[in-house]
Image (tube, grey):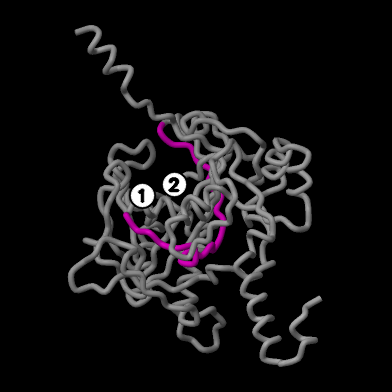
Amino acid sequence: MEDAAAAAASSAVVVEEERLDVLNKIGQKIGISKPRGEVHRDGDYHRAVHVWIYSESTQELLLQRRADCKDSWPGQWDISSAGHISAGDSSLVSAQRELQEELGISLPKDAFELIFIYLQECVINDGKFINNEFNDVYLVTTVDPIPLEAFILQETEVSAVKYISFEEYRSLLVKEDPDYVPYEVDEQYGQLFEIIRRRSCLDENEAFLATTDSAIKLLPEATKPVSGWKGLEYKAAFPMLKPPGANFYPPDMDKKEFKLWNDSLTEKEQNDAMGFFTVIKRHSEFSLDSSSPNHAVHGTNHLMTAHDLYSVPYSKEYNSFLRKAAELLHEAGDLAGSPRYIELY
């Protein structure tokens, strides 16, 4: 019996606590990570994502009710989806992952619009939980509400979801309704409601960016299928694939992260990373996007290492563009009918 118990104990899966990158007071990484519990115990600055789902036709926000087992604000209504950015992960990939894990919604990067960054500094649970958190706030705009039966809730995180008018939700926060996680709507977080209000405004004398100018995309496979519903329609926030040369490194990479990664490389790898003909990318973005039919594998070793960054030569990163350009040049030469156009120098 003792041997059987020992064998069972040894085969038990030990789940390591999530680690977070520790930041300084202006949101920069300082080069160390700590377990989530220690970060909130010690009051370390760290980063998280907030994802709001907004139904344009009904002007409603999706809220989730936090599970009763949560160590912060249990049982209260909160953001559509939220979570920490794990050590080494990027902001946008974390936003995608949280939405997928908590609500069962899988959306591409162009559905997420980063609208502002919010610093939350508070102490709860009789001083046992210190939250010094930089939050990257994203807005996902859908044409219509997502049917509630289309969601797949992560029971350890979310107990229910509902839609509510953004104006009603704001008034509940102003009144400090105890059923809702508090946010300072007259301070930094008021930007959320102001952005939505401007986009809902029909006053031609007031300048605003109409989301109707964005591309509407239908993604039936984004959620669990629901009878009689054609699927989730969202408004693209920005082009999913940037033109070549638009970004040669992840937009959320800072100098500290690059230096820590670069210092771990060999001299040759450092020269490649600092050269003019290399693109810096993230392993985490590759892993999340690899299931996409549009994802192109560049032939680089994508095995996870201690660092999230890796480099790709231009010749591999832009191979598909170069091949297409070569084909077009050859076609142009053939059409010209002159030998001097066919031979390219």
In the foreground, 26 or 325: 325
Start-end of magenta stretch:
104-125
Please, what is the three-letter code of the amino acid marked with disc 2? Gly
Give left or right: position of 20 versus 311.
Answer: left
Q: Which residue lies furthest to the top in this view?
A: 2
Residue 4, given in percent of the width and then of the height, sits at 23, 12
Q: Residue 83 carries which label?
A: 2
In the foreground, 302 or 70: 302
Q: Which mark is residue 3?
A: none
Magenta run includes residue 112: yes
The answer to whether the residue labelled 2 contacts the one labelled 1, judged by CB atoms less than 8 Å apart, is yes
Q: Where is mark 1, residue-wise?
A: 101
Magenta run includes residue 35: no
The number of discs equals 2
SS assignment at label 1:
helix
Category of crowding for the residue at label 1, using alpha-carbon neighbours closer than 10 angstroms: few (below 14), some (14–19), many (at least 20): some
Residue 136, given in percent of the width and then of the height, sits at 53, 54
Please, what is the three-letter code of the amino acid marked with disc 1? Glu
SS assignment at label 2:
strand
Residue 253, given in percent of the width and then of the height, sits at 65, 50
